[in-house]
Image (cartoon, grey):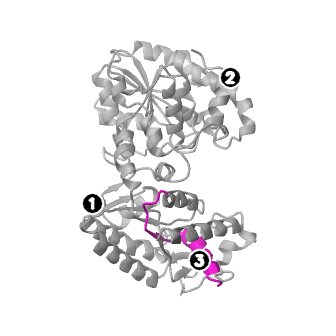
Amino acid sequence: MSVTTESMAAWCRKLLGADPSCPRLTLEQYLANIPRMECLGNLPAGTPVLVRGDVDAKPGAKIGEGDIRLRSMKETLQYGQQRGWKQIVFGHIGRDPEKSLSKVAARLGEILGCPVTFIDDWLDPATTTIKPEVVKTIADAAPGSVIMLQNTRKYDIERVLWKAKPADIDALAPKLAKLANEFADKVAKIYVHEAFSAGSLDASSVVVPIAMDKVALGKYEAEQFDGHLKECLNAQMVIFSGLKIDKLDDLEAMIARGKIRKVIAAGSLAMALKKASAELEGKQFDLGLSEDPAHKDKPYYIPPERIEQAKRMITDGRTKNIEFIMPVDFVLQEGQVSTAVGSGNQQFDVGPASSAMYDNVVSDFIAAHKSDRPAAVVFHNGVFGMFEDPRFESGTKNFIPQLKRMTDAGIKVYVGGGEGGTALEKYGQPNWVTYCFTAGGTVLNALGSEPVPYLVALKMAAEKMGPKPHK
């Protein structure tokens, strides 16, 4: 059945959280209602299957270099090959519409041990029409073939929901409905999402599923969500840091689950918590440039409402016996170490006294939890300072070995990917932790305050398949 403009508008309102009738669901509730690959096992050979792939990769000289996301797709694609499906992989690379997936297609072929047909120009943007050569290529492909479409972000329609407001939906719905119908009519009616890191509101991830007869979560994604991420929901301690102050929302949501007992904070999050803690005690703590209204357009700016949020978090946390461990000294812009930030200054890292304090906190946590069965869980996200600059790397560099200490003590340690994963690679070894995710943003969404957009879309698409379609 074709997607109408009205149904697309209603779909987009749910995606953007603009439908008050939609209940707020937990990660577990989304996952419980999304089919897995096994529900597609009886599709006949030759069936076209659309795979939203994790193709945002930079392949190096050989397999194993810069292609971890492509390798994460291997099991899903081989599952389809073994059943003779014609799999059409599509997705984005970076944020630049001019970037090409041609090298990615070639590397995917190396990983799978088969040719991957690459289609460079597949959509007429003026009419939102999939080009006839795509239809012909799919029709002519042999069972078991893999085809890749050029960078979806080449076309504006892929990106129209990124900054869309509820008021924009009615104007966008006709073209989005046309896109979804084009995919269903000319490419495939079966859809698999195997792009764990693709957490944006890309049309390929959140719009196309509405027109599909069947949808499923890829094997790698299912492993991430059903295993590692569910484990992280039980973390007793989190190490949370970074420049983006909106991470406070994610930390607040994680704390609300009632499992966390210790929060080691650094970065802008720590600055907000530090000032909030001081004000709750009737003291002052000057954040310097981070609270200067003249810098409100900068990523490090912390608005007053975030301080109030931090106060609520600390107050609520104290009633739940949650301990917030905040830095006691800072490395400022000229590399000087200070116990204060102060007017005109900016902190770029935690100082040596803070690193020593974190070491002691970890020691105490190990002593208290090394014998836990099941094992205690720790979640680490972000870095402690601007670690790209050697002057401001000490805090992060000193803490990464603490992850190994906890892992060696039998504690399960998870790293949320992103900069935390980069720091682990730079200062440690993969086996220093239980698991390091490949997608920081998706992990924070899943554990934090906002649902993962593609899980919202897949759940809504699965509802059209009837009750418990994956059983």
Residue at the spot 49% in from the left edge and 61% down from the top edge = 255
State the mark number for residue 431. 1
3D distance between C-alphas at marks 3 and 2: 50 Å
State the mark number for residue 277. 3
Tag 3, which secondary structure?
helix
3D distance between C-alphas at marks 1 and 3: 36 Å
Label 1: few (<14), some (14–19) or many (≥20) C-alpha neighbours in 10 Å: few
- Nearer to the camera, 427 or 250: 250
Tag 2, which secondary structure?
helix
Label 2: few (<14), some (14–19) or many (≥20) C-alpha neighbours in 10 Å: some
Residue 295 in the image: x percent, y percent? 71, 69
Are the residues tagged 3 and 2 within 8 Å (C-beta)?
no
Mark before the other along the chain sequence, 3 or 2 = 2
- Nearer to the camera, 346 or 201: 201
Tag 1, which secondary structure?
helix
Mark 3, mark 2: which one is toward the viewer? 3
Magenta residues span 257-283
Residue 265 covered by magenta stretch:
yes
Side (left or right) of 164 relative to 39: right
Are the residues tagged 2 and 1 within 8 Å (C-beta)?
no
47, above or below 210, in the image = above
Side (left or right) of 114 relative to 93: left
Side (left or right) of 186 relative to 295: left
Query: Does residue 54 show up?
Result: no
227, above or below 108, in the image = below
Q: In the rendered image, which residue does mark 2 sit on?
A: 5
Residue at the spot 32% in from the left edge and 18% down from the top edge = 42
